Amino acid sequence: MRYCPDCGTGHECEAATEGRTDPAVEIARINAKRDVEIARMEYREAMELAAVEADTAVVVTELETAADVAVAEEMPPPPADDSEDDNQSIIVEGPPAEAAPEDAPPPVEEGSEPPVPVAKRKSGLGAW
C-alpha cells in the first residue's frame, strides 16, 4: 500500500495511480504476448513442415512410378497364346475329391427321370 502524496493517508488515490499499472498485470501482459508469438512461430513451422512432407510424398510417388515404368520396359513381352479360340486356359488344381458317402442317393443319369420324392408323414395335432 502506498501513501497518498496529496492527503498522506495509506490508500491508493486514483489521481496518483492512473499512469501506473500493477507489476503482476504487466508481467501477465508480457507473458501473453510471448505465448502468442510462440504459437505463431509453431504454426509457421508446422505449415512449412507439412509443405515439405507433401513435396516429399509427391517426389517419392514420381520416383516409384518411374521405377515401375522402367521395370515394365525392361521385362520381355508375355508369350503369345497358341490356342485357336483366343481364349486363355487356366488350370486350377483343387483339393482331392472325397468319396461319396454310402447313404448318398445314386447320381442322376442324363435323359432319365428324377426320382419321385416320398410323401412326408404329417405329425402332430394338425392345428396349424
Image (cartoon, grey):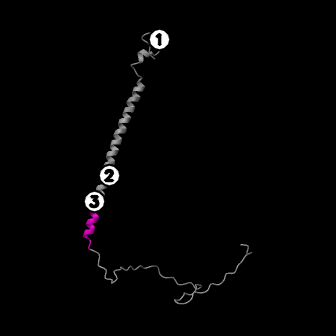
Task: Identify the residue shown where x is 27% and y is 67%.
Answer: 71
Graded by Cα atoms within 10 Å as few (under 14), some (14 to 19) or many (20 or more), the crowding at tag 3 reads few
Graded by Cα atoms within 10 Å as few (under 14), some (14 to 19) or many (20 or more), the crowding at tag 2 reads few
Residue 104 part of the magenta-drawn span: no
Q: Earlier in the sequence, mark 2 or mark 1?
A: 1
What mark, if any, has residue 63 been given in the picture? 3
Task: Identify the residue shown where x is 44% and y is 12%.
Answer: 4
Q: Earlier in the sequence, mark 3 or mark 2?
A: 2
Q: Earlier in the sequence, mark 1 or mark 3?
A: 1
Q: Is residue 90 left or right of residue 119?
A: left
User: Disc 2 marks which residue?
Assistant: 54
Amino acid type shown at disc 3: Leu
The majority secondary structure of the magenta stretch comes to helix
Q: Are marks 1 and 3 in contact (CB under 8 Å)?
A: no
Task: Identify the residue shown where x is 56% and y is 84%.
Answer: 101
State the count of labels.
Answer: 3
Where 85 falls versus 4 (above or below)? below
**What is the CA distance from the residue labelled 2 to the residue labelled 1?**
68 Å
Q: Position of residue 40 (x, y in %)?
A: 35, 39
* Comparing labels 2 and 1, the label whose residue is closer to the camera: 2
Graded by Cα atoms within 10 Å as few (under 14), some (14 to 19) or many (20 or more), the crowding at tag 1 reads few
Task: Identify the residue shown where x is 41% and y is 18%.
Answer: 18
**What is the CA distance from the residue labelled 3 to the residue labelled 2?**
14 Å
What mark, if any, has residue 9 been given in the picture? 1
Q: Which residues are magenta?
A: 65-76
Q: Secondary structure at mark 3?
A: helix
What mark, if any, has residue 81 been given in the picture? none
- Residue in the foreground of this view, choosing between 125 and 65: 125
Quarter of the view holding residue 57: bottom left
**What is the CA distance from the residue labelled 1 to the residue labelled 3?**
82 Å
- Residue in the foreground of this view, choosing between 10 and 55: 55
Q: Secondary structure at mark 2?
A: helix
